[in-house]
């Protein structure tokens, strides 16, 4: 049975048994009755991997994406303070993306195009968005290795992309160290697995949207990642937004979000 006219209310689906292992599936809100498959954008909220923040940060973005003809998968995951951190957070986001195939697609009546999956994430969610695109590089025994659903494009919104540098800078009052359970000197193997910078090249095109007035995640996180990724052969579009702060990219009313949405939609082709 086809779903018929789309509804604005998302479907909340569990991909695990923990209260945080769920996601909201926002389907396109037009009434197009053809059988074309919908591209998917995975929305990943930030909050320095901490339990004080949740997927409500991504609800407006997911709803806006659905208005533009894509299915948006706004994921929750275990965070530091509620069972997350190393390796639970990584395992959860990996499972959430793979669940597009066995949970979200059946719920959409088979309308998801799993060959056109893009990740969009803000701050720590930007880290997870980029890590998800690069996890195919991991050794088979690493958390999140061997993806069932591959990512074809990434939009990192003020992303924390170099965890070693982020730990050294004390981002989020030590959030990187809390997330990985130690410093780069104490648990170097975790940083090697979890940091997108350490996985380069990932072979997936990315867009880095970062404001020049970001006081939470400094723009050098995007600057250095872009330079290293391009040098390694990856395709990267860095958009340095003059005068933009840390939170503008997740405000659907702001031009910073429009830049993120446009980049995500461009990866549909």
Image (spheres, rainbow, N blue to C red):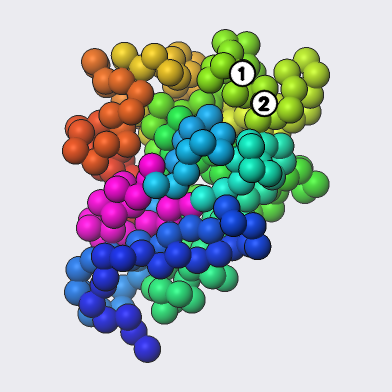
Residue at position x 51%, y 36% from top? 52
Specify start and end residues of the magenta stretch as a single range: 57-75
**Residues at marks 1 and 2 touching, judged by CB atoms closer than 8 Å:** yes
User: In the picture, which quadrant includes the N terminus?
Assistant: bottom left
- The residue wearing badge 1 is 174
> What residue is at 54 percent from the left and 70 percent from the top?
103
Q: Rate crowding at label 1 as few (under 14), some (14 to 19) or many (20 or more) other CA atoms within 10 Å.
A: some
- Between 61 and 165, the residue placed more toward the observer is 61
Q: Give the answer, above or below, for where 35 lies relative to 236.
A: below
**Residue at the image point whose x is 69% and y is 53% from the top:** 146
The answer to whether residue 166 is magenta is no
In x, y percent, where is residue 96?
Answer: 56, 56
Judge from the rendering whether residue 12 lies leftward or rightward of residue 128; answer left or right: left
SS at mark 2? helix
Dot 2 crowding, Cα within 10 Å, few <14, some 14–19, many 20+: some
Percent across and percent down for residue 90 are: 64, 43
């Amino acid at each position: 049975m086809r779903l018929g006219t789309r509804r604005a209310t998302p479907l909340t689906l569990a991909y695990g048994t923990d209260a945080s292992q769920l996601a909201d599936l926002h389907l396109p809100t037009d009434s197009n009755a053809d059988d074309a498959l919908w591209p998917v954008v995975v929305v990943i909220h930030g909050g320095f991997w901490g339990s004080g923040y949740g997927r409500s940060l991504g609800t407006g973005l997911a709803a806006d994406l659905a208005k533009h003809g894509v299915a948006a998968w706004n994921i929750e995951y275990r965070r530091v303070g509620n069972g997350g951190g190393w390796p639970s957070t990584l395992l959860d986001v990996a499972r959430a993306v793979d669940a597009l195939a066995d949970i979200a697609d059946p719920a959409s009546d088979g309308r998801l195009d799993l060959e056109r999956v893009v990740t969009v994430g803000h701050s720590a969610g930007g880290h997870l968005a980029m890590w998800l695109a690069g996890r195919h590089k991991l050794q088979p025994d690493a958390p999140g290795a061997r993806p069932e659903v591959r990512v074809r494009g990434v939009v990192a919104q003020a992303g924390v992309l170099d965890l070693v540098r982020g730990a050294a800078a004390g981002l989020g009052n030590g959030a990187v160290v809390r997330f990985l359970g130690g410093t780069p000197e104490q648990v170097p193997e975790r940083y090697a697995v979890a940091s997108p910078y350490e996985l380069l090249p990932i072979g997936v095109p990315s867009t880095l949207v970062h404001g020049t007035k970001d006081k939470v995640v400094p723009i050098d996180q995007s600057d250095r990642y872009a330079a290293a990724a391009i040098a390694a052969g990856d395709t990267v579009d860095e958009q340095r937004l003059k005068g933009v702060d840390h939170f503008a990219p997740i405000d659907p009313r702001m031009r910073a979000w429009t830049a993120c949405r446009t980049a995500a939609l461009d990866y549909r082709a």
